[in-house]
Image (cartoon, grey):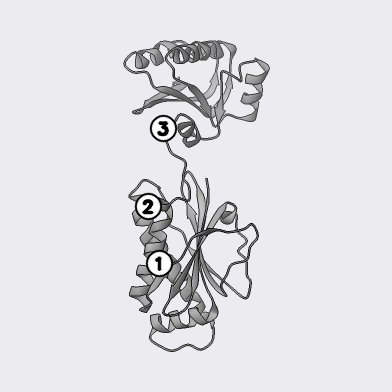
Amino acid sequence: MDKIFEIQTFENYLLIKLKGSCDFSNLKGFYDEVMNVLQYSRPHVIIDCENLESISKDWVRDLLRLHLFLKSNDKKLRFVQASAALKSNFKTLGIDDAFKTSGTLKEALIDFGLAARRSLDTEFINPFLDSTMNVLKVQAGVDAQAGKIYLKKPNEPLLGDVSGVIGIVSENFTGAVVISFPEATFLKVMSGMLGEEYLELNQDILDGAGEITNIIFGQAKVILNGKGYGIKTALPSVVHGKDHTVSSHDLMGQSVVVPFESNSGKFFVEICLSV
């Protein structure tokens, strides 16, 4: 018979994974095994319920014992990935105050003070700005300087005529980066990048907006992942037209805009993050 629980130890917390139907027949040894681990340290405990089908009152009783032990040592018990039925059961039993739930492991660690929320701070923004200036200089001979950052208003259209868009995807957050050029600026940038003068937009050079965005994203990703952000590879897209908008779930969060001035004209970088 497969073991109904698995205990994993980490530096500041204990992760217990429950699976299947937890009832009296498979309860034996659970509490003693957990306490054997806790006698050497006093970490927080997280119960992963992703693969839990049901739990009996016998298990609830031992988990309450564990909760009381942790509470006496100023530590917490948290359930993650709990189903709606399990939460309802906790409420029916009147133990929902003791058996608090978080959506994910990351959220539990944030609540415990063991992980930080990702935010649109200089640590996150600056790699994109530095990469923008570097990529445009190397690829197109464009010297650019970042202006004063500001918050974008809800439903405010993008400020350029051609925009490269790329999603930011991580285990713990999503977002997007947009680099948006007025038409005149974009034509000069692409002329410098391709070594041929362009006076009007066409599909070939429109694709260049995605390529530039992808290179900027790639350089920033290396820096941010070195700091533990865990950003995954993504594919860019291009949007163009006067007063265009980007309809994407990746932009359903706080957005900041950084205006740039350059020897090819002004352009804008927008960064959005949903934690």
Q: Which residue is drawn at 59% across and 22% down?
A: 54
Q: Name the residue under label 2.
A: 224
Where is residue 46 shown, x and y percent of the image? 46, 25
Q: Write down the residue under mark 3.
A: 114
Which numbered disc, 2 or 3, marks the residue that appears first in the sequence? 3
Q: How crowded is mark 2: few (under 14 residues within 10 Å), some or many (20 or more)?
A: some
Q: Is residue 254 left or right of residue 46?
A: right
Which amino acid, by three-letter code, is at mark 2? Leu
> In front here: 206 or 153?
153
115 shown above or below 159: above
Q: Residue furthest front?
A: 148
The residue located at (38%, 78%) in the rendering is 140
Asked if residue 235 is positioned above or below residue 25 in the image, the reply reads below
Of the numbered discs 2 and 1, the one sitting upstream in the chain is: 1
| Gap between marks 1 and 3 measured at Cα | 33 Å
CB under 8 Å between callouts 2 and 3?
Answer: no
Q: Classify residue 56 as left or right of residue 198.
A: right
Identified by mark 1, the residue type is Thr
Does label 1 or label 3 sit earlier along the sequence?
3
Quick one: 198 or 21, which is closer to the camera?
198
Q: What element carries label 2?
A: helix
Q: Element under label 3?
A: loop
Number of numbered labels in the structure image? 3
Decide: marks 1, 3 in contact (CB < 8 A)? no
Q: Which mark is residue 40?
A: none
Residue to which mark 1 is pinned: 132
Dot 1 alpha-carbon crowd within 10 angstroms: few under 14, some 14 to 19, many 20 or more: many
Horizontal arrangement in the rendering, residue 77 relative to residue 252 (left or right):
left
